[in-house]
Image (cartoon, rainbow, N blue to C red):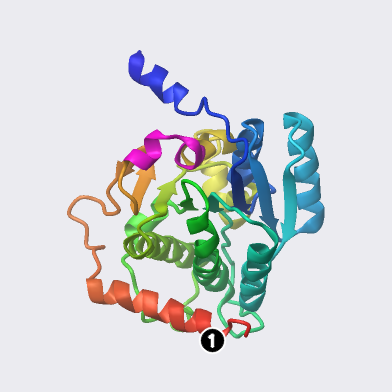
Amino acid sequence: DTIEQSGHLDLEVSMAGRAFMITGANSGIGKATAMTIAKKGGTIHMVCRNKDKAEEARADIVKETGNKEVYVHILDLSETKKVWEFAEAFKKKYKALNVLINNAGSIMSQRDTNAEGLEKSFASNVLGVYILTKSLIPLLEKSADPRVITVSSGGMLVQKLRTGNLQSERGRYDGTMVYAQHKRQQVVMTEQLAKTHTNIHFSVMHPGWVDTPAVANAMPDFHQSMKDSLRTPEQGADTVIWLAVSEAATTNPSGHFYQDRKMVSTHLPLAWTHSSALEEQKLMSVLEDLAKTFQPH
């Protein structure tokens, strides 16, 4: 089957001399992505919250791939000021970043706020992704064939963008619904950033329903009832890797949503989830204002 064949060849590429930053790289899809790209010779910057887990994952990757160009950076994306500080320091220290993979995600079982007074999952899933991406854009733009890939979720298909309750202050806090809303916000953010920064290839994707520690912890019932039909982290990582390394991916326009290596609609047929340009602009200006508020001077 020639399509299968060429699809297989899409990943037969060397990544030597290219640098990849992967958030949440110590387990699940992030680790599977790091492992495969390290095998192809890419330099890996693992951005993780937990030092012990990160170092353990790094040791696994180095051992399995023989690639020692794997660096651990400790950062909790929900700590808004620290995200800025990390990105600014990274730009000073490293001269290239070819690909940013926003993979870390957080589902909270109850509402909690960070030191800046922002709801924690919004701070990491949306504002943290925005700040990290925006701050690293100048470095990406200086690097060859730059790409930004954000791991979203099909859960966002049942969410319409809502900018009126970004901090989840109103109503009952439902962590999985809040998460799905953040995943919709990531799609809108990707579409908007792609319009503004035309020399970077942006994409956002649904990995399928994957058996990861995050899913098991956040949605135990879903995990229990679905566990035989969930994908492995490697299967979930396939499209992330394809978007990060293949030439084929960048022949598609920037700013699109992908599933199984194909561009798909960000709305279900006849969906009520379409948002106005005004609402989308509002999300971007709120993010810009919040980001500026906590930017170190």
At x 35%, y 58%, the residue is 198
Q: Is residue 224 above or below residue 103?
A: above
At x 34%, y 54%, the residue is 255
Q: Residue furthest top?
A: 1
Q: Nearer the viewer, residue 110 or 106?
A: 106
Instruction: Tell me residue 158's x, y (percent).
Output: 33, 58
Label 1 secondary element: helix
Type of amino acid under label 1: Thr
Tell me if residue 261 can be seen: no
Instruction: Tell me residue 182's x, y (percent).
Output: 45, 65
| Residue 37 located left or right of residue 129 | right
Quadrant in the picture for the N terminus:
top left
Instruction: Tell me residue 78's x, y (percent).
Output: 62, 71
Quadrant in the picture for the C terminus:
bottom right
Residue under label 1, please give it.
Answer: 293
Q: Nearer the viewer, residue 55 or 209?
A: 55
At x 79%, y 57%, the residue is 51
What is the magenta segment's predominant secondary structure? helix
Report the span colored magenta. Answer: 241-251
- Label 1 crowd bin: few (<14), some (14–19), many (20+), radius 10 Å: few
